[in-house]
Image (tube, rainbow, N blue to C red):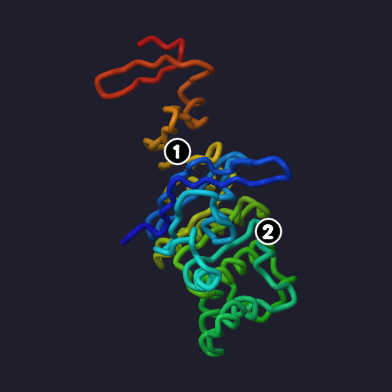
Amino acid sequence: MPPVIEAENLIKIHKQGNLEVVALQGLDFFMESGEFVSIVGKSGSGKSTLLTILAGFDRPSAGSVTVAERDLVDISQRELTGYYRHEVGFVWQDFTRNIVPYLKVRANVELPMLLAGVGGRRRKKRALALLEAVGLRNKAYSKVGTLSGGEQQRLALCIALALGPKLLLADEPTGELDTETSLEIYELLRGLSHDSGLSVLVVTHDVALAQRTDRVVRIADGRISTHGRFGQEELIAIDQRGMVQLPRDMLIESGIGDHVRVKLVEDGILIQPEERDE
């Protein structure tokens, strides 16, 4: 199967008055169907910008991006509506933005299907099935205000999944939750990905939570800096100037400070702390 996401040389420039802020600087990103991937990076690194482009909420200044074989650069408004209905689901950092507070739980899940023209029986059946999957079946007729924060987050997931998207995007989906509830949400996302083949991409600042995904991608200064698995060998991107950014946790663990010794060896390039003997 082709990758669910193919993004090449993405550039995004935001204009703020007379200033231009470069959010993405030639970023390349690929994601296979059925993967559960997390994106980590400092504030302002370009994480959320990438997510909004993939969601179709924004368009890159340059480069190409395809999601589920749909070109998001030259997409028309009509095609974009179809994209929202069939290809992608989005969970906001403030997950209450997914929820209509005056509707009851089941009605919230049914709303996207109602707007898409799905029949009443099918809406009810799918809404109850989704609520069952996230442990909210007994809350189907409750008011949103009676739900806990974790329950509202699970409801937001159900709403985002109502139309059966191929890709779920989540921007800091556990940013407002406690540690225990956050872990529950990530395990739920893992189950959805591994059991149903849903592709899941989350942006997070929490490295401990990122470790629970299949693959971790680090973004720095609008580019992919590394991608791999924690505790294992990582593939590190080299920019057009030949610069390499090493992950901070690797630097700390290896004892590397402000300077390193670099040596060409038979198998490649050896990088060591400045004071270490060969």
Of marks 2 and 1, which one's residue comes earlier in the chain? 2
Res 134 seen here: no
Q: What amino acid is found at the position of numbered circle 1 in the picture?
A: Thr
Which residue: 70% across, 73% down? 100
Q: Position of residue 87 (x, y in %)?
A: 47, 68
Kind of residue indicated by mark 2 = Asp
Q: Residue 94: give its label.
A: 2
Question: Where 143 sits versus 263, above or below?
Answer: below
* Residue corresponding to mark 1: 226
Residue 241 or residue 76, whichever sits in front: 76
Residue shown at the point (45%, 27%) measured from the top left = 243
The x, y position of residue 135, in whole percent, is 56, 71
Q: Is residue 22 above or below residue 262?
A: below
Report x, y in % for residue 204.
57, 48
Q: Is residue 247 visible?
A: yes
- The quadrant of the rendering that contains the C terminus is top left
Residue at 68% x, 54% y is: 176
Left or right, residue 181 beside residue 225: right
Looking at the image, which residue sits at the far front? 18
